[in-house]
Image (tube, grey):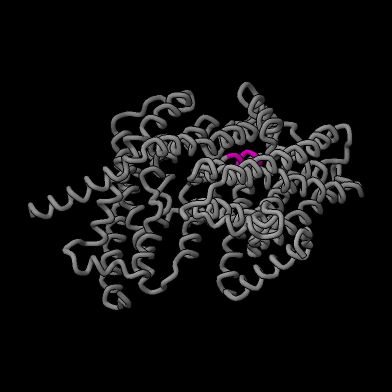
């Protein structure tokens, strides 16, 4: 009916997108298996690197609280967050810049659904979720080691099981905001190759405990990546709730900040996205 | 012979000019590539910091590398990779085989591998001329991590290892690309190679850290010459007889891969069929 606004069911559309991607992935099954193996082998290599480091030390940063198994909890948290990002948003963000460059964004703009939603969720790369298996196993193993150790065993507070996934979602939201803002900026920049390198280098900082950034240069760096581009809290906050003893005074303030940063990042990325759409001029004719 | 040399020179010059068009992007990209080292500096600082606290008597080295050595090592592997990494070489060859573009090398009196080698040399020359600035800047800023100037012999061996790393990297990647004659799609294979080479070339950490079975495995692979070896030579971790032997082994690898490339190219052409226009 003319004039009547359309209210698509976002959940149903999302599920359809995910199902379509799964169908698509499953029609090239051996390719899917190879991709899953490839993405997990990268993770295993990383694990090997840290196993190597812990042959020489018991802790990353003296008194930082990141011993071997605490750090492995941290590492599995990184795996969870990265695999969600790689599965849900990475293929879409890449495609988004391409849509802008080629002018095919027109078709997305015409559809009766929020453009940011459509652009962000269209494709899902299921093979990246294979890392959940690795991350999950590593998490369970490390937690068993931590809770069963003779000296000062870790007691997991029931609330940790709520806070951990919650802050993982926050972390994903922060990284998503950063990614979508970066790819939206290709409206102004035209090319985006350097942007992807930029993404890689920025998120590189999030992969380590924030305690390692100390000293004359580290402290300002830590401040920038906590308060300006909040990538440091992405993994650190959820990992702390799981790996460290439950301590509201120690992890609380940063967690509160993480919630605020998540909301701010989402709002900022929405703003950038809308601004980008305003500046978008279709390519060619 | 003269005509041949002239042909090479033209190919080289064109590729060089083509490359220098984007020098601004280049320089910025090179500088950004040092960013991951920043996190490495902090990570290893934290590791050494913890080691010092664990035992007052800590020797403060890991596998013979001090903290400064680690940073210098990472900075030097960047240089090694600048010589040995061949972005897009294997995938380019595979693509040319798949879409039939290599047909032009069958009709023209130009050899594909030679042509690509000259192209790479030009790319690298262009790259170094632009990357010199960023590299010099970073090395200058980080000079305190480097050991005192090595002697002329070490410098010579270092230079030689870098040049050999370039040739080795080229023929290694070219032979992987040529596999496309047999399997049209090599992208997943390439990904596996990339992962292995990142880990086993020493790009991620000094290979001396590896425990027994692995340390022997990497010794038998050519990958260590791509990043680990030049850095280790500069830092004086490989010296004397061992250095000479290693360099010879590297030469043998280069020759073997050159021969392999040639054989694959000939065999591949024999079974190649070009379809379509």
Residue B255 higher or lower than B157, as above or below: below
Q: Main secondary structure of the magenta part?
A: helix
Task: Check residue A151 for magenta coloring.
Answer: no
The answer to whether residue A186 of the structure is visible from this angle is yes
**Residue at horizontal 60%, vertical 52%?**
A93
Image location (x, y in percent) of residue A263:
77, 40
Residue A2 in the image: x percent, y percent? 75, 62
Residue furthest right in the image: A158
Above or below residue B24? Residue A274 is below
Image quarter of the N terminus of chain A: bottom right
Residue A68 seen in the figure = no
| Closest to the observer, B153 or B189 | B189
Boundaries of the magenta span = A202-206
Residue B63 image offset from top left, x and y in percent: 54, 40
Q: Nearer the viewer, residue B140 or B207?
A: B140
What residue lies at 66% left-to-right and 27% top-to-bottom?
A: A214
Lateral position of residue A138 relative to residue B24, left or right: right
The residue closer to the viewer here, B116 or B258, is B116
- Residue at coordinates 71% horizontally, 30% vertically from top-left? A227
Considering only vertical position in the picture, is B156 above or below A98?
above
At which x and y percent is residue B193? 47, 59
């Amino acid at each position: 009916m003319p004039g009547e606004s359309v209210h698509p069911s976002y959940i149903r559309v999302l599920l359809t997108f995910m199902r379509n991607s799964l169908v698509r992935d499953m029609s090239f099954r051996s390719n899917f298996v190879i991709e899953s193996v490839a993405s997990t082998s990268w993770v295993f290599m990383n694990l090997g690197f840290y196993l190597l480091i812990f042959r020489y030390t018991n802790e990353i940063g003296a008194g930082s609280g990141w011993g071997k198994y605490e750090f492995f909890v941290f590492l599995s948290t990184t795996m969870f967050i990265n695999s969600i990002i790689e599965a849900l948003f990475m293929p879409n963000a890449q495609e988004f810049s391409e849509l802008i460059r080629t002018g095919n964004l027109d078709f997305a703009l015409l559809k009766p659904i929020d453009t940011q939603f459509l652009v962000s969720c269209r494709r899902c790369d299921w093979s990246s979720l294979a890392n959940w298996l690795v991350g999950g196993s590593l998490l369970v193993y490390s937690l068993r080691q931590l809770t069963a150790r003779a000296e000062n065993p870790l007691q997991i507070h029931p609330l940790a099981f709520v806070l951990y996934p919650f802050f993982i979602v926050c972390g994903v939201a922060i990284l998503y905001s950063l990614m979508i803002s970066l790819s939206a900026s290709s409206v102004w920049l035209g090319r985006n190759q350097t942007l992807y390198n930029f993404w890689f280098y920025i998120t590189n900082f999030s992969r380590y405990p924030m305690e390692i950034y100390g000293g004359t240069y580290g402290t300002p760096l830590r401040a920038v990546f906590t308060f300006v581009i909040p990538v440091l809290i992405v993994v650190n906050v959820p990992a702390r709730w799981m790996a460290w003893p439950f301590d509201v005074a120690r992890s609380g303030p940063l967690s509160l900040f993480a919630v605020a940063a998540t909301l701010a990042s989402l709002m900022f990325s929405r703003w950038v996205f809308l601004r980008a759409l305003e500046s978008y001029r279709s390519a060619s004719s | 012979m003269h005509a041949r040399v002239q042909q090479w020179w033209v190919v080289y010059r064109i590729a060089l000019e083509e490359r220098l068009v984007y020098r601004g992007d280049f320089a910025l990209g090179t500088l950004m590539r040092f960013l991951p080292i920043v996190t490495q500096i902090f990570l290893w600082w934290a590791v050494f910091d913890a080691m010092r606290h664990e035992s007052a008597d800590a020797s403060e080295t890991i596998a013979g590398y001090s903290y400064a050595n680690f940073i210098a090592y990472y900075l030097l592997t960047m240089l090694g990779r600048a010589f040995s990494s061949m972005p897009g070489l294997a995938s380019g060859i595979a693509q040319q085989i798949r879409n039939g573009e290599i047909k032009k090398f069958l009709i023209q009196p130009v050899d594909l591998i030679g042509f690509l080698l000259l192209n790479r040399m030009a790319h690298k020359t262009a790259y170094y001329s632009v990357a010199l600035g960023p590299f010099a800047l970073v090395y200058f800023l980080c000079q305190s991590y480097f050991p005192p100037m090595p002697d002329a012999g070490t410098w010579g061996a270092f230079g030689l290892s870098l040049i050999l790393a370039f040739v080795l990297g080229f023929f290694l990647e070219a032979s992987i690309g040529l596999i496309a004659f047999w399997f049209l799609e090599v992208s997943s294979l390439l990904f596996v190679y990339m992962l292995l080479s990142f880990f086993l070339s020493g790009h991620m950490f000094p290979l001396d850290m590896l425990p027994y079975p692995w340390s022997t495995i990497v010794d038998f692979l050519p990958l260590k010459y791509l990043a680990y070896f030049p850095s280790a030579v500069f830092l004086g971790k490989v010296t004397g007889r061992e250095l000479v032997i290693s360099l010879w082994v590297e030469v043998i690898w280069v020759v073997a891969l050159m021969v392999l490339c040639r054989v694959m190219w000939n065999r591949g052409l024999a079974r190649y069929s070009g379809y379509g226009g």
